[in-house]
Image: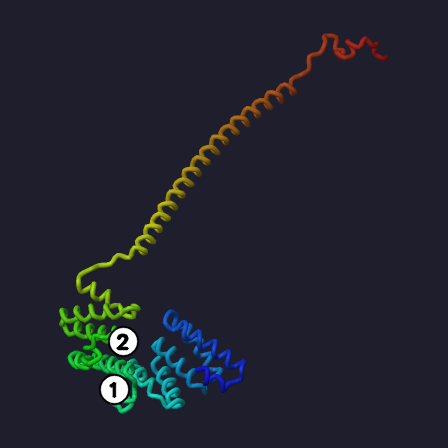
Amino acid sequence: MQQELQSLPKGLAEDVSRNLVMVARLIDEDPESAYAYSKIALRLASRVAAVREAAGFAAYANQKFSEALAEFRAARRMTGSVELWPVMADCERGLGRPEKALDMAGAPEVQKLDKAGQVEMRLVAAGARRDMDQLDAAIVTLQSPELASNSVQPWTARLRYAYADALLAAGREDEAREWFAKAVESDKDGSTDASDRLAELDGVEFVDVLVEDENEDENEDEDGAKTAATQAEAEAEETAGTASDVDEDLDADLDADFEDEDEDDEAESAPDARPEDGSDAADSDSGETPRG
């Protein structure tokens, strides 16, 4: 890839390289984001075979099979390599054309593939047979020296898994269990769910402890929320009761104040007591002689 990018200006090559790195990094965990990065790289350098190939795999990971096939074909025209032949055939399957995939499985290009590519082509052909409800033919297609070999190769786990799955679909459960077990033995990096399938056949049920813990935490949170709500409600009722008592005390005080004010008003409105001679008390007490 680096050699192909050398044909681009330095700055452009660096931008394309960064986007291709993100495609490779995200394609398994976040295929949609990987696809977005591939489109950026494609806009920057559509005449670079590595870019077309990366765009094809990103589209393939998002099940955009028509787009993926177009990109793979473009990359193959640029390089002349048959390396992408199996995945191109699988795109034909994805487009609902298993017969075309089988035609490609019998094409001369298959003989030019390395061992890994030929095994991949066998897997695609078996999948096409199953698409056409030809289970027995799919089983026969997978039977090969690579399947029978005891040596573990990068493709061994997937080949054994596909064979076990086909046997199970055909109702041959005992044989399927045997081959799922062999797939588990060769699947060192967990590329298949053979262990889960084997456990399912043995009637073993797995409990997801993390999910249970999360559920317990959620229940505790709900109980805590309910308790808090109950306490808040009780406090609110207590506060309301206290407020009611305060209101009653205030009413009583106000009534008493009103009664006192009424008594004062009555006292002020009563007639003043005067001496019998009709003179003012103040004048009488002062000793002064009234002016004539």
Residue 260 on image: x %, y % = 58, 22
Mark 2: amino acid: Gln
Say above or below: 203 vs 22: above
Question: Which quadrant of the figure has residue 237?
Answer: top left
- Residue 221 visible in the shown view: yes
Q: How many C-alpha atoms fall within 10 Å of the one at disc 1: few (<14), some, or many (≥20)?
A: many
Question: Which quadrant is home to the N terminus?
Answer: bottom left
Residue 173 on image: x %, y % = 14, 69
**Residue, x 47% and y 83% (percent of image)?**
5
Q: How many C-alpha atoms fall within 10 Å of the one at disc 2: few (<14), some, or many (≥20)?
A: few
Question: Which quadrant of the figure has residue 186?
Answer: bottom left
Q: Is residue 237 left or right of residue 129?
A: right
Label ID, residue 105? 1
Disc 2 to disc 1, C-alpha distance: 22 Å
Say above or below: 197 vs 140: above
Nearest to the observer: residue 189 or residue 94: 189
Which element carries disc 1, helix, strand or loop?
Answer: helix
Mark 1: amino acid: Ala
Residue 182 on image: x %, y % = 20, 70
Label ID, residue 153? 2
Q: Is residue 103 left or right of residue 266?
A: left
Say above or below: 159 vs 230: below
